[in-house]
Amino acid sequence: MLNASDGQERTAVVAAGDEETRILLRGLLRLHHFRVDGEAEGATQALALLRDHHPTLLVTDVNLAEGSSTNLVAEARAVLPTIRVILVAPASRPPPTLGPGMGPNVVLLRPFRIRQFAEAVQPGS
């Protein structure tokens, strides 16, 4: 089975219930030289994309059309244990924390600056 660390290409899946948010995240990822393998409105679709494409990065908004972002993050870790996960949330409602190793690598609070996004997608951050 492939995992997210195989190969050197930087690939991503985007999940957000709002189309404008997906467009924004896709554009930012491409700006930072990621290939976006798919976009999902909800958790079920996002998990299918993760299983099909084995990306190195999942960027998910807390607002999904179906399912919860916390469950998506936990299930993404079960499918691809080494995947890097960025969770985008409004500063007014930070997401709940998950157990060690189950939560996102980075919680990016909206509104954020492009520099903050660039730092979030780097593996060492």
Image (tube, rainbow, N blue to C red):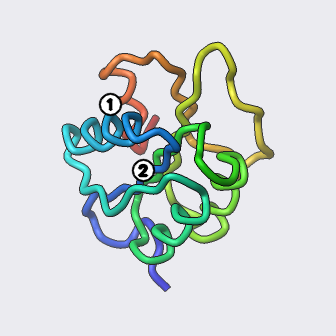
Q: Is residue 100 above or below residue 89?
A: below
- Quarter of the image holding residue 74? bottom right
Q: Is residue 116 left or right of residue 75?
A: left
Q: Does residue 101 appear in this view? A: no
Give the Cα separation between the discs numbered 1 and 2. 15 Å
* Mark nearer the viewer, 1 or 2: 2
Q: Is residue 8 above or below residue 113?
A: below
Q: State how many labels appear.
A: 2
Q: Element under label 2?
A: strand
- Between 13 and 121, the residue placed more toward the observer is 13
How packed is label 2: few (under 14 Cα within 10 Å), some, or many (20 or more)? many
Q: Which mark is residue 19?
A: none
Residue for point 20% across, 46% down = 33
Residue at image mark 2: 14
Residue at image mark 1: 118
Q: Does residue 84 appear in this view? A: yes
- Quarter of the image holding residue 123? top left
- Quarter of the image holding residue 39? bottom left
- Between 120 and 43, the residue placed more toward the observer is 43
Residue for point 46% across, 68% down = 49
Residue for point 30% across, 44% down = 26
Look at label 1 and name its amino acid: Ala
Q: Is residue 5 left or right of residue 94?
A: left
Look at label 2 and name its amino acid: Val
Q: Element under label 1?
A: helix
Q: Is residue 122 left or right of residue 70?
A: left
How packed is label 1: few (under 14 Cα within 10 Å), some, or many (20 or more)? some
Q: Is residue 67 left or right of residue 14?
A: right
Q: Earlier in the sequence, mark 1 or mark 2?
A: 2
